[in-house]
Image: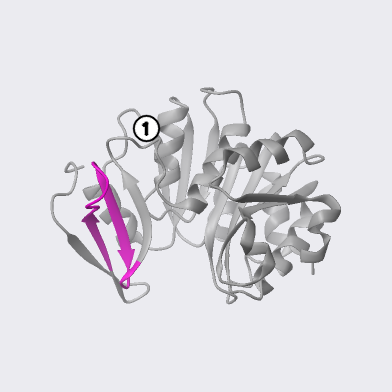
Amino acid sequence: MSGRSGGAVSRFLRTTGQHATIEPDAFTDGGYVLSIGGAEQSHVNLDRPDDIFYEYPRRIGHLVDLAAPPGEPIKALHLGAGALTLARYIQATRPGSVQYAVELERELLDFVLQHLPMPEGTNLTTVIGDAREALGALDPGLQFDVVILDIFSGPEAPAHIADPGFYREARERLGRDGLLIVNVGDEAALTLLRSQVAAMREAVGDVAAFAEAGMFEGRYPGNIILVGTQGRWPESWTAALAARGPHPATVLAGVDLDPFSG
């Protein structure tokens, strides 16, 4: 790895035909922004990887915090790597964790690791390929405390991933108390969210949704985090996550999530 990036750098991504750019964040010391095709995708703070700048990955970080006692190493699988913001967070908050990251774009992963090195001591295995194919190709004995899916953007989700079969395969990779965490980027109508709540409910023990409060009113596009548990959703987590923010935060589970299923 070459060390941290200086000015803006870019790389052509052959799979999508777009350009990826990494540039310093003028508002955050040690901060860098990854953009793809001109749209901001990820924010990384090399000086403080435990400080997540964007809202939706911060919510995912709060869920990871609940996956095991504070500071305890975990096993994590990231389906969709981006700038590896959450892998950096897990290493910073849970040193010694074992992590795997799957990314379809080889050039993107190489680009990120070259210019934004991982924290010292990170145990990260990278896999290039389709999320579902890579999931099936992993060592059958591998079990994870968290599986994080972050590849959905808009209503046109990959059909072979946005279905109950995929979620069942992901659940099989979870340990007894493991969490399946899915970022759903959706339009205001929340069509993708409804289909994914229904699909996950067929595959896992229970499902909850975590987002900025206004997202559930269907007034604007944005991100909602779905989390699947092996057993019943712990009721105490609802208040805990809402209190952690970013605010205003809403957590829906059980009958409260029913209007967003199917």
Occupied quadrant, residue 86: top left
Compared with residue 99, is residue 35 higher up or lower down, i.e. above or below? below
- The residue lying toward the viewer, choosing from 6 and 255, is 255
The residue sitting at 55% across, 73% down in the picture is 154
User: Percent position (x, y) of residue 186?
Assistant: 58, 69
Q: Which residues are magenta?
A: 20-39
Q: Among all residues in the image, which is located at the extreme front? A: 248
The residue sitting at 79% across, 57% down in the picture is 257
User: Percent position (x, y) of residue 81?
Assistant: 43, 53
Q: Quadrant of the image for the C terminus?
A: bottom right
The residue sitting at 76% across, 41% down in the picture is 230
Q: Find out whether residue 31 is within the magenta segment.
A: yes
Three-letter amino acid code of the residue under disc 1: Thr
Occupied quadrant, residue 51: top left
Compared with residue 139, is residue 252 higher up or lower down, i.e. above or below? below
Question: Quick check: 105 left or right of 240?
Answer: left
User: Percent position (x, y) of residue 243?
Assistant: 62, 38
- The residue lying toward the viewer, choosing from 254 and 197, is 254
Residue at disc 1, secondary structure: loop
Helix, strand or loop: magenta stretch: strand
The residue sitting at 33% across, 47% down in the picture is 44
Question: Quick check: 24 left or right of 191?
Answer: left
Q: Find out whether residue 19 is within the magenta segment.
A: no
Occupied quadrant, residue 109: bottom left
Question: Quick check: 43 left or right of 100?
Answer: left
**Neighbour tally class for label 1: few under 14, some 14-19, many 20 plus, Cα within 10 Å:** some
Disc 1: which residue: 122
Q: Quadrant of the image for the N terminus?
A: top left
User: Percent position (x, y) of residue 192?
Assistant: 66, 70
Q: Among all residues in the image, which is located at the extreme right? A: 255
